[in-house]
Image (cartoon, grey):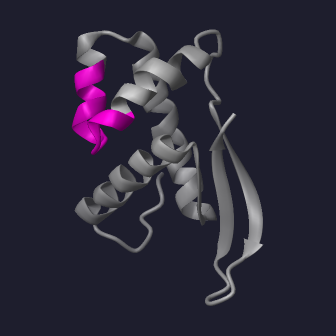
Amino acid sequence: MYRKLGRDSSARKALFRGMLTSFFQYDRIETTEAKAKELRGLADQMITLAKRGDLHARRQVLAYLMDEDVVKKLFDEIAPKYADRQGGYTRVIKLGLRKGDAAPLALIELV
């Protein structure tokens, strides 16, 4: 089962597309714990596709990520780093509670 995060499916997909693009652009992002845990699986899928490195994989990633420069970075810099790793490319670090609404925050970063 996946987390719905109080959104319908299209809003959830749009949220994760934006977050994933930012994540690969900056290598780490700070977000709520639930979003970070859900993002972890998507990020691992994208890196696994990028490790394949063929045209079909690149087009599949381009269909999901919103920035061609980020896709280039994913295929040229990030994926080769994990060539000998069989998954677990990200780590989620809990940061405590957010001041405004006491939501649990987490940092998700590449290992």
- Is residue 18 highlighted in magenta? no
Front-lying residue, 33 or 26: 26
Q: Which residue appears at 24% of the width and 12% of the height?
A: 55
Left or right: 47, with 17 as reference point? right
Is residue 63 located in the magenta-colored stretch of the structure?
A: yes
At 48% across and 26% down in the image, what residue appears? 47
Q: Which residues are magenta?
A: 58-70
> Which percent across, then down, holds residue 57?
30, 18
Which residue appears farthest toward the bottom when viewing the image? 100
Q: Residue at x 29, y 42 (%)?
A: 67
Q: Residue at x 44, y 68 (%)?
A: 5
Residue 82 in sight: no
71 lies above or below 37:
above
Q: Position of residue 63 (x, y in %)?
A: 22, 36
User: Taking the image as drawn, is residue 110 in sight?
Assistant: yes
Position of 12 with respect to 105 (left or right) is left
68 above or below 100?
Answer: above
User: In the image shown, does 93 or 68 lie closer to the viewer?
Assistant: 68
- x and y, in percent, of residue 75 in the image: 41, 21
- Total tally of numbered discs in the picture: 0
Q: Is residue 10 left or right of residue 77?
A: left
Which quadrant holds residue 102? bottom right
* Majority secondary structure in the magenta region: helix
Q: Quadrant of residue 19?
A: bottom left
* Quadrant in the picture for the C terminus: top right
Query: Left or right: 98 with respect to 19?
Result: right
Work out which residue is located at the far front of the displayed protein and give it. 69
